């Protein structure tokens, strides 16, 4: 549908522009028919970032005027094409300001499509572009995905960037990043509002990889997943040439669609013969792009050559800790415990290799602690100093660690859900429930590459058809839950849990037309029972209007367990007891037991038993895309 | 601070203020404003508006040195050390690591002399770290000391 609209609009443009094309310039270079065909070519439209909006006609998404040669170039691919071909044949005093030097990707594409153009182009020496090519030399390009981060609403869905691989030190390899130009120290609420409504301009930037490694791995404790791509050198040259064209250009930033994932996908789609965004959704998420890039090409084979993980400090600590033998782990625990003062004494029974392994693990621990607690205590700062001094006193030696085999993030479930559930309620009877969740995942989802034991649900809508009536059952604007279980048992490493939720829900399961608007939050402890199972207990509270003869303030305790019993079977059970603080005669208990069966990205089957004043049973089929 | 570095002659010498800001003699901490910089770790959105890696802008904002002086290998190395000091000091204690390699690449230290440079820097920093007052210095002071030690040993 979208492509038909685009085609109709393009034909309109061509019709309106016909008089201007009657006498083509450089008559030997192209014919009018050729020009009209090229102006609708997908690559030309991609090079000009032409898109049709929901209500608007075809228009480039580039907002800066310097990107266009033709006066009407922003809204007319045809005029822009014609002007580009003409301008490229003009010799100017400063070669760097010529169209050939400013638009090397357009040049490359045009001489491929119009072979006669080559002989018409004046020789130019694009010194600035040449330097850019040297600075951004790449033998291979990687798509890098930064995993989601619950500490910042703008980062919950992850981030994407491109990495230019060459033979340099990896930390010094260049990257292309895209983001909004946000003033320093912007108010977070303003940042979110303007980010959603298009209040910021955005552009590409280039930074060495160590900047991202520092921010994501070290400061935000997020894993980076690197998808190394199989592109030809010509593809790489073309992509880098277009990046040069965009280097100083701006776009309008929209958090939900025209975001980092969208622009990085647009850049890659120039050379990758795969749709990297999901056209069935009006928003674009980084996950969509990594999921798209791993699909098989129409011509067969995969664009992805290899997938690598750059682990966060927290992951590095966990991995190292679990590779230590029992004595080494005990030593780490002894040193990390607040009572420990004699580092030398603790380390003395160990061999040289064991000492190094213990100290390196503790380096990760204190680096992690510094981030998770904002700053190290005086005692921990001194311990870190002693550890450094100890390691300096030992001969230099590298410790080796196994790389754990973790499932990459594109293997997790698709983020958008449509669910159909036959439901039976012992007070209200049977009904058919329909659920739509815009994004992203819950405690039962396949969670490769995501925070384990966490839930991040946005725009989760449930309606129920019962007694020939369709009623709203609940609507969550957001529902975030994080069971930050400890991976090591060391002090400060997780062990807490929290949740935050806002929306509209029936006050309990005894009624259908009893919606209340509410905001709730919880905080408590969580424990990892084994690799696949977590237990949690939280104190929670809820503010709601109207009171529905019960109350406005509800508080209580909730405990639960989440466990992946097999890859195909995950279960989550929770029980709670709550009082209304402004009407203490009202109190009740609740139970929620939900299970997921199946390990496919696009579907699963779930069962749910709930009790909250009434019992309710449901069997669901969920489709994800 | 002065009390702390007094026993470490080599470091004390290195910390002496530089009076001239020629290209070869530039101290990025004093001449490029790196000492006063606060690294912004506010994620991807902030990264693009973050000008600290735009060396030209940094130098202009310091109003002390010329753009060229602060766009060279030494200034870049200094900024890298300030950003990644935690990784660098850990890897120096371990004797090797990718941050150390990147640091030596940035400073353009030739391959043949790298092992010697690292051995000497390791020895100097061992002395610095073994002093109990090390724990009381700020991250910026630690990074500056490391940079001065490295430059003295490498150039």
Image (cartoon, rainbow, N blue to C red):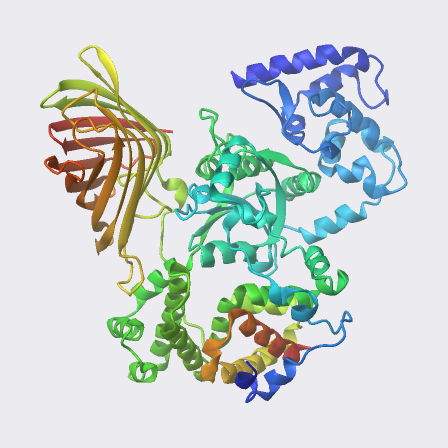
In this rendered view, identify the residue nearer to me: A288 or B64. B64
Task: Give residue A249's position: percent from left, percent from top.
Answer: 68, 38
Residue A449, visible in the rendered structure: yes
In this rendered view, identify the residue nearer to me: A135 or A159. A159
What residue do we see at 66% from left, 23% from top? A41
Residue A453, visible in the rendered structure: no
* The furthest residue to the front: A582
Task: Give residue A49's position: percent from left, percent from top.
Answer: 64, 29
**Residue A44 versus residue B14 in the image, above or below:** above
What residue do we see at 61% from left, 12% from top? A8
What residue do we see at 23% from left, 53% from top? A526
**Residue A119 versus residue B122 in the image, above or below:** above
Compared across the picture, whether A367 is left or right of A115 comes to: left
Number of numbered callouts drawn: 0
Q: Quadrant of the C terminus of chain A?
A: top left
Task: Give residue B63's position: percent from left, percent from top.
Answer: 73, 61
Which corner quadrant of the image does residue B25 belong to? Answer: bottom right
In this rendered view, identify the residue nearer to me: B91 or B52. B52
Task: Give residue A180's position: percent from left, percent from top.
Answer: 57, 41
Which corner quadrant of the image does residue A428 belong to? Answer: top left
**Residue B37 versus residue A344 in the image, above or below:** above
Compared across the picture, whether A570 is left or right of B4 comes to: left
In this rendered view, identify the residue nearer to me: A263 or A166. A263
Compared across the picture, whether A180 is left or right of A289 comes to: right
């Amino acid at each position: 549908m979208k492509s038909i609209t685009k085609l109709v609009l393009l034909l309109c443009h061509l019709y309106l522009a016909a008089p201007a094309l009657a006498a083509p310039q450089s008559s030997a270079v192209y014919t009018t028919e050729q020009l009209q065909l090229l102006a609708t070519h997908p690559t030309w439209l991609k090079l000009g970032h032409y898109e049709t909006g929901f209500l608007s006609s075809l228009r480039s998404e580039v907002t800066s005027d310097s990107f266009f040669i033709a006066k009407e170039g922003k809204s007319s691919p045809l005029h822009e094409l014609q002007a580009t071909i003409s301008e490229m044949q003009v010799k100017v005093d400063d070669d760097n300001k010529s169209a050939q030097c400013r638009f090397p990707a357009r040049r490359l594409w045009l001489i491929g499509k119009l072979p006669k153009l080559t002989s018409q182009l004046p020789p130019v020496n694009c010194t600035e572009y040449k330097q850019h090519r040297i600075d951004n030399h790449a033998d291979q390009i990687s798509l890098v995905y930064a995993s989601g981060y619950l500490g910042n609403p703008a980062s919950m869905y992850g981030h994407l960037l491109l990495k230019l691989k060459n033979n340099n030190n990896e930390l010094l390899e260049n990257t292309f990043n895209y983001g909004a130009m946000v003033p320093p120290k912007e108010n977070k609420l303003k940042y979110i509002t303007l980010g959603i409504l298009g209040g910021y301009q955005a552009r590409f930037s280039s930074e060495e990889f160590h900047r991202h490694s520092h921010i994501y791995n070290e400061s935000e404790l997020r894993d980076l997943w690197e998808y190394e791509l199989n592109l030809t050198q010509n593809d790489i040259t073309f992509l880098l040439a277009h990046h040069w064209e965009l280097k100083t250009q701006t776009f309008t930033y929209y958090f939900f669609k025209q975001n980092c994932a969208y622009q990085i996908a647009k850049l890659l789609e120039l050379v990758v013969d795969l749709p990297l965004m999901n056209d069935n959704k009006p928003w674009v998420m980084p996950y969509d792009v990594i999921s798209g890039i791993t699909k098989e090409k129409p011509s067969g084979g995969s664009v992805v050559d290899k997938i690598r993980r750059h682990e966060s400090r927290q992951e590095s600590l966990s991995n190292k800790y679990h590779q230590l033998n029992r004595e080494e782990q005990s030593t780490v625990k002894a040193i990390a415990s607040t009572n420990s003062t004699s580092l030398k004494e603790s380390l003395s029974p160990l061999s040289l290799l064991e000492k190094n392994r213990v100290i390196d693990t503790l380096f990760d621990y204190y680096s992690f602690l510094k981030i998770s607690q904002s700053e190290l205590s005086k005692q921990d700062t001194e311990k870190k100093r002693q550890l450094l001094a100890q390691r300096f006193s030992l001969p230099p030696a590298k410790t080796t660690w196994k790389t754990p085999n973790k499932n990459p993030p594109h293997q997790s479930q698709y983020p958008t859900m449509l669910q159909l559930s036959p439901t039976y309620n012992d007070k209200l009877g049977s009904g058919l429930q329909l659920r739509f969740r815009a994004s992203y995942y819950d405690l039962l989802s396949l969670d490769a590459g995501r925070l384990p034991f966490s839930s991040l649900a946005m725009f989760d809508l449930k309606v129920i058809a019962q007694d020939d009536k369709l009623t709203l059952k609940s609507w969550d604007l957001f529902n975030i839950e994080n069971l930050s279980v400890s991976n090591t048992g060391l002090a400060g490493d997780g062990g807490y849990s929290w949740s935050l939720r806002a929306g509209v829900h029936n006050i309990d399961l005894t009624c259908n037309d009893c919606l209340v608007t509410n905001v709730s939050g919880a905080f408590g402890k969580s424990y990892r029972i084994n690799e696949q199972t977590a237990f949690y207990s939280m104190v929670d509270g809820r503010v709601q209007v109207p009171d529905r003869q019960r109350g406005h303030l509800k508080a209580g305790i909730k405990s639960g367990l989440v466990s992946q019993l097999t890859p195909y079977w995950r279960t989550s059970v929770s029980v709670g007891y709550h009082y209304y603080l402004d009407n203490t005669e009202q109190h009740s208990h609740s139970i929620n037991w939900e299970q997921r069966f199946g390990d496919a990205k696009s579907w699963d089957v779930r069962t749910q038993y709930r009790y909250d004043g009434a019992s309710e049973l449901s069997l669901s089929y969920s489709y994800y895309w | 601070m002065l009390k702390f570095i007094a026993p470490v002659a080599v470091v004390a010498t290195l910390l002496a203020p530089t009076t001239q800001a020629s290209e070869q003699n530039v101290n990025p901490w004093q001449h490029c404003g790196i000492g006063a910089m606060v690294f912004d770790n506010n994620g991807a959105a902030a990264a693009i508006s973050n000008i600290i890696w735009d060396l030209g802008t940094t130098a202009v904002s310091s109003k002390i040195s010329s753009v060229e002086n602060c766009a060279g290998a030494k200034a870049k190395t200094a900024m890298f050390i300030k950003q990644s000091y935690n990784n660098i000091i850990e890897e120096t204690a371990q004797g090797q690591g990718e941050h150390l390699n990147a640091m030596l690449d940035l400073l353009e230290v030739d391959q043949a002399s790298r092992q010697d440079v690292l051995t000497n820097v390791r020895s100097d920093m061992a002395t610095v770290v073994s002093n109990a007052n090390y724990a009381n210095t700020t991250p910026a002071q630690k990074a500056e000391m490391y940079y001065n030690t490295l430059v003295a040993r490498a150039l």
